[in-house]
Image (cartoon, coloured by chain):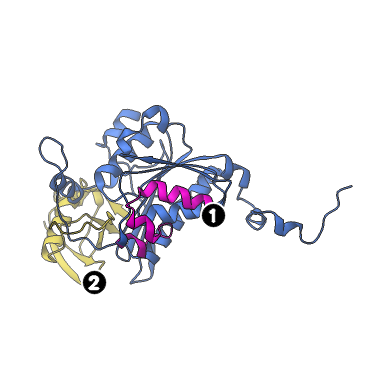
Chain colours: A yellow, B blue
Amino acid sequence: MPIRVKVRNAETGSTVDMEMENENTMDEIVRGAASFWNKNPGAYVLRRGKRLLRGSQTVLEVGLKDADELELIPDPEGGYRAPPQ
Amino acid sequence: MTVIRPEDSDKDRWGRSRLIDWLDIEQVQSARYLVLGAGALGNETIKGLVLSGARDITLVDMDHVVRSNLSRCVMFREKDGAERRWKAEAVAERAIEIDPGARVRPVVGRIEQLSDDEWKTYDVVLGCLDNIAARLHANSHSYFNGVPYIDGGTEGVAGRVQTIVPPFSPCLQCGLNRSHYRVLERRHSCTGSELTYYRPAMAAEITTTSIIAAVQVLEALKLVCGRYDAVIRNVMHYNGLRNSWDELELSIEPACPLHIKTS
């Protein structure tokens, strides 16, 4: 049975509800949320409370429940590269 | 009988630092530091280390100074940009102006050129890098050689610091997900050679850079003074627009190759 969690965009504060199954991974949630907000193609991590969630973890392994809240945080790589001439 | 004068404490360069009870200046001075990257974060990190009393630092960078670095790099001067000096050499020279007793050895080249034999001679490695591939190299070589690694990263007014103490902590690779690997894949061809890939990343913002570098240096000081109990567990994220700090826990990734090898 699917559960519905809230994913918060750490950069803007906006949220989106995401429906997921027990076998969905955190990688899939990162990709879905970053795509929804048209994020730059950079690196992002997910947190739940005080824990960072690993990409390979499933909804079941993390123990996500209905109405839980996750936050999508940009993972700074650093270094500005000028656009190619 | 020892006779002291009121102004004696002003003559000791680290007189004030010695008032911080856990901060062992002799340990700070005798430790060996490896700093990877001499960009904005590397500049601030070297500044913090040298002011804190570090005397034996190796600084690795393969790039040269350009004028646009000057708004974020405290150690660079106009002439460095005009002369396209190597960043590592310019920083090393300025560090000695801050403390003539400090020795910053510049290495102009890629971090991959450092051998494992050299890597294991350091007490702590500070990563001030600008890409995931170099971070993974620093992470694996530090972990493999049992040297604590403090990774810093910034983008605009956001930043992160991860402190990795092998073999106890999860490593940098444990926290990567597919979004990191997609960034890596875009930068490398199927032969492994680096491609010219443009990602519209935000540049570093100097106050954020200073904050992140300061945390990295403080983490290094804690480690060389044996305050393992006080280091970040495991990743600290900073958001300058929200004025927030979050210390986040990360667990070891069972499939992480570093942990499979060391367990």
- Tell me the residue at 65%/54% (across/down): B13
Query: As shown in the figure, which amino acid type bears the numbered disc 1?
Result: Ile
- Tell me the residue at 19%/56% (across/down): A42
Q: Quadrant of residue B125?
A: top left
Q: Tell me residue B65's x, y (percent).
A: 33, 54
Residue that label 2 marks: A12
B122, above or below B205, in the image: above
Residue that label 1 marks: B98
Badge count = 2
Query: As shown in the figure, which amino acid type bears the numbered disc 2?
Result: Thr
Q: Tell me residue B262's x, y (percent).
A: 35, 29
Q: Tell me residue A3's x, y (percent).
A: 15, 60
**Magenta stretch bounds:** B68-97
| Numbered label attached to residue B243 | none
Query: Is A12 contained in the magenta span?
Result: no
- Mark 1 vs mark 2: in front: 1
Residue nearest the viewer, comparing B17 with A72: B17
Q: Are marks 1 and 2 in contact (CB under 8 Å)?
A: no
SS assignment at label 2: loop
The residue carrying pointer 2 sits among few (fewer than 14), some (14 to 19) or many (20 or more) residues within 10 Å by Cα, namely few
Query: Is B71 contained in the magenta span?
Result: yes
Please, which chain is the residue tagged with disc 2 on? A
CA distance for labels 1 and 2: 41 Å
The answer to whether residue B21 is visible is yes
Magenta segment, prevailing SS (helix, strand or loop) = helix
